[in-house]
Amino acid sequence: MATPNTLLWEVFIRSRNGLAHKHVGSLHASDATLALQAARDIYTRRGEGLSIWVVPSSAITASDPSEKGMMFEPAESKIYRHPTFYDVPEEVGHM
Amino acid sequence: MATASIQVSETPLVLYALRRADDALILGHRLSEWCGHAPALEEDMALANMGLDLLGQARELYSYAAKVEGNGNDEDKFAYLRDVRQYRNLLLLEQPNGDFARTMVRQFFYAAFADLYWRAMMKSDDTTLAAIAAKSEKESAYHLRHSSEWIVRLGDGTEESHARAQAAIDDLWAYTGEMFHIDDSERALIDDGIAVDPATLHPQWFKTISDVVSEATLALPKNDWMQQGGRSGRHSEHLGHLLSELQSMQRTFPGVTW
C-alpha cells in the first residue's frame, strides 16, 4: 500500500554465518533511515541477520530480460570453464 | 461477563510488578489494534513488532507477580480476569490510538521514559526484575529510536503532519507526569534498592524529548498540570472498552484454549 511518493528500496541481509549480504526483498520507505528500520522489522524478525544494507532500487542497473540470449547463452557451451577437469589439492580447502 | 474477576493480594512487590506489566500489556494491545490498518505495510509490521515486544515484557512481569503473590494466579488470570479498577497502568498508555501521529507521540513519550527506567532497573537488587529489565531495555531503545524518527518526520514534514503531531503532543502532555509519580508502597521498594525512583530519570527524559521535539520543529506545552489515577485503578473511560475486547474470549468461554 505504498503512496506514489514513497521510494522503493532493496534489502540485503548478512546472516549469522553468512559471509556476504544477500538480497532478501524490497520495501517502501521515504528515506534511508526509515528503510533500514523497516528492513529490520520486516526481514530480521526471526533472528535472520547481523547486518543490513538498504539500497535505493533506482540505483540498480539491471540487465534487460529480453537480451538474455545474447547475454548468457554464449557461456552455456563453455563447459571447460567449470573447474571439473582437475583435482583441487586438499590443502587449498574451501574455495 | 460470565467469569468473576480474581482477587489480588497487592503486596508492594506484587503491585510494583503488576504496574509495569499492565503498562506493557495495555500499550502492546493498543499497538495490536493497528494490525492491518497502518498507513503502510512496513509500518504495520513495525507497530506489531513493538506490540509483541511489549506483550513479552508483560508476560514476564505477570509471571513474576504471580510467583511473588503465590495465590495460584498466573499471567493469563492477571490479564484476562481483572476488572478495569484492578488495572494499574499509566493513563497515557490506554489513550486511544487516534491518528498515526498520536500513536507515535504516545509511543515516543513512553519509550523515552521506559528506556531509562529499564536501564536503571538493571541495577535492581531483585535479580528477576534486573533480568527482565536487561531484556526490555534493548526493546525500548528501539521503540524510542523508531518513534523519534517518526516524530521528526511528522513534525518537520507537511503542514498537515506537523499540525497532527503538535495536536497529539498537546493532548497527551498532561498524561506524562504520571510516569514520574510514586506512592508510599513504591517508595519503600525504592529505599530497599528494588524499585527505580522515576524522579531521578526526569531530567534525562525531558532532555531527550525536548531535543527530538525541537528537531521536529514542534513545541512542548508550557502547561505543567498533570493527570493521575491509573496507578491506583482510576482510569479514563477508554480502558474499559479496551478490556472488554481484550478479555471477551476468556470472559465468555472461561479457560478456553486453542
Image (tube, grey):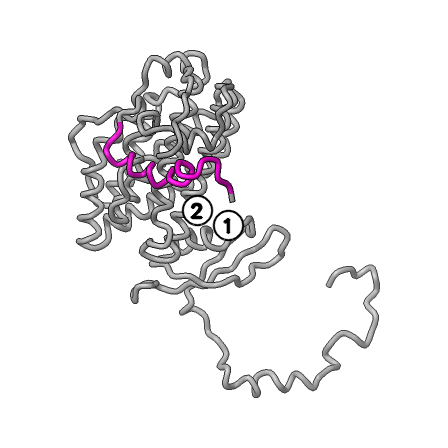
Q: Please give left or right for residue B68 compared with residue B163 in the image.
A: right
Q: Please give left or right for residue B80 compared with residue B176 in the image.
A: right
Q: Chain of mark 2?
A: B
Q: Amino acid at mark 2?
A: Asn
The quarter holding residue B230 reads: top left
Please name the residue shown 55% across and 84% down the image.
A68
Please name the residue shown 53% across and 24% down the image.
B128
Viewer-proximal residue among A12 and B81 = B81
Quadrant assignment for the N terminus of chain B: top left
Q: Does the magenta segment cover residue A69?
A: no
Residue A19 picture location, percent across and down: 62, 56
Decide: marks 1, 2 in contact (CB < 8 A)? yes
What residue occupies the far left of the structure in this picture? B223
The quarter holding residue B145 reads: top left
Residue A40 picture location, percent across and down: 46, 51
Q: Does the magenta segment cover residue B254?
A: yes
Label 2, on which residue? B49
Q: On residue B79, which mark appears?
A: none
Q: Chain of mark 1?
A: A
Magenta residues (range): B235-257
Q: Please give left or right for residue A65 compared with residue A73 in the image.
A: left
| Mark 2 crowdedness (10 Å alpha carbons): few <14, some 14-19, many ≥20 | many
Q: On residue A45, which mark appears?
A: 1
Q: Amino acid at mark 1?
A: Arg
